[in-house]
Amino acid sequence: MTRMNHLMSANRSTSFDRRSFLRYTAVAGAAAGAAGLVAACGSGGSGGGNNGSTPDGSKFGTVGIQLSWLKNIEFAGEYFADSKGYYRDAGFGHVNLIAGGAASTSVEAGLDTGKIWLGMSAPQTTAPAVLKGLPAKIVATTYQKNPFAIVSSAAKPINSPQDMKGRKIGVQDTNQLIFKALLAANGMKPSDVQIVPAQYDPTPLANGEVDGWASYVTNEPITLAAKGFRTANFLFADFGLPLLAETLTVRQQTIDNERDKLKAFLAAEIKGWKDAYADPAEGARLAVEVYGKDQRLELAEQTQEAVAQNDLLVSADTKANGFLSVTDDLIAQNIEALAKADIKISADKLFDLSVLREVYQEHPELKS
């Protein structure tokens, strides 16, 4: 066993493999796989129930919010909004943050059955569900850029898709479609690259068995660096696939019938994410010591991920339009990117940013 392999085996919990598997499945799953998760949509799902809400005497009651993954730093904005009372002040008796992961159903399935009121997902997961009949829309986004990346050794860096030509790239089964979409977006063919079927632990990259690895920029590079392996990376979003991530998705009936409630929630979310951006160390502490306490997270790693995450939260557009916002141009880019992954959908079927824009019109102070 190499030194790197030994270090990674000795220090990494088995939860890393499961986390990576489900993270990649949720964020970069193939259209067919995503559609399969919500095959019941439009054909027998309850499509309502209490729409994820329960009266509790407060203005808006208790709502179920499903996270896209286990309670780690990715949801720091929600932790601030909850711990600082922003949800309560907005009129919610309680906001139940429901962890995603191995034991959970998809956000789209939860919306279909009425078990949740809102969920964090991704366009390439939500779009196939909508095409299958789920009446849902993306109303905001946490990440302006998808964290999906190709990570490589700093000693032999791969800084662009063109740098992958002729080199071995580890790609997981669930990521084959999105990886090939990256190639197509950059005028390349699968034969230009030596695609190596991979699992989810990046040890083969550290051992030199491959030159590049399909990765989350806020995860594997930080984990590898902690084990003494220096890395380089490039984001898919910077090379023709500008997909959003951690998108806030609701049923159409929420937009139509609970507009004020949704605006109140989004205003609290904005406040929470402004705090998370300003204080990544406290966000990491909340993840490690409070909300994700049962995950046995490492404070140093979560803090590093929080700092890295900040680069995904803001852009020139969010500085002009506010946190969680999406411009019409970025929506158009996402529709185009989805088409490259063989997911063809129109913008009006997948996105509705009108509610968030009303929030900022009514509360311009939230932009500052």
Image (cartoon, rainbow, N blue to C red):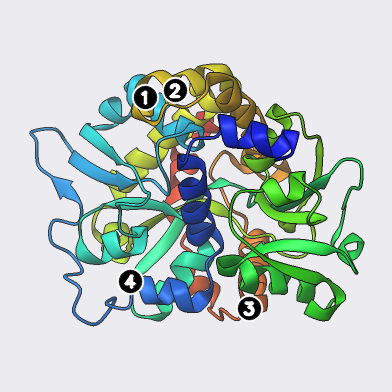
SS class of the residue under badge 4?
loop
Q: Mark 1–mark 2 contact, CB under 8 Å?
A: yes
Where 151 falls versus 310 (above or below)? below
Residue at 83% from the left image edge and 80% from the top image edge? 191
Q: Mark 2–mark 4 contact, CB under 8 Å?
A: no
Q: CA distance from mark 2 to mark 3?
A: 38 Å
SS class of the residue under badge 1?
helix
Residue at 9% from the left image edge and 36% from the top image edge? 56
**Amino acid type of the residue tagged 1 in the rendering:** Lys
Nearer-N-terminus badge (2/3):
2
In the rendering, at what x and y percent does residue 31 appear? 51, 76
SS class of the residue under badge 2?
helix
Q: Which residue is mark 1?
A: 293
Residue 189 shown left or right of residue 366 in the figure: right
Front residue of this view, candidates 97 and 22? 22
Q: Which residue is mark 4?
A: 135
Q: CA distance from mark 4 to mark 1?
A: 35 Å
Q: Which residue is mark 3?
A: 339
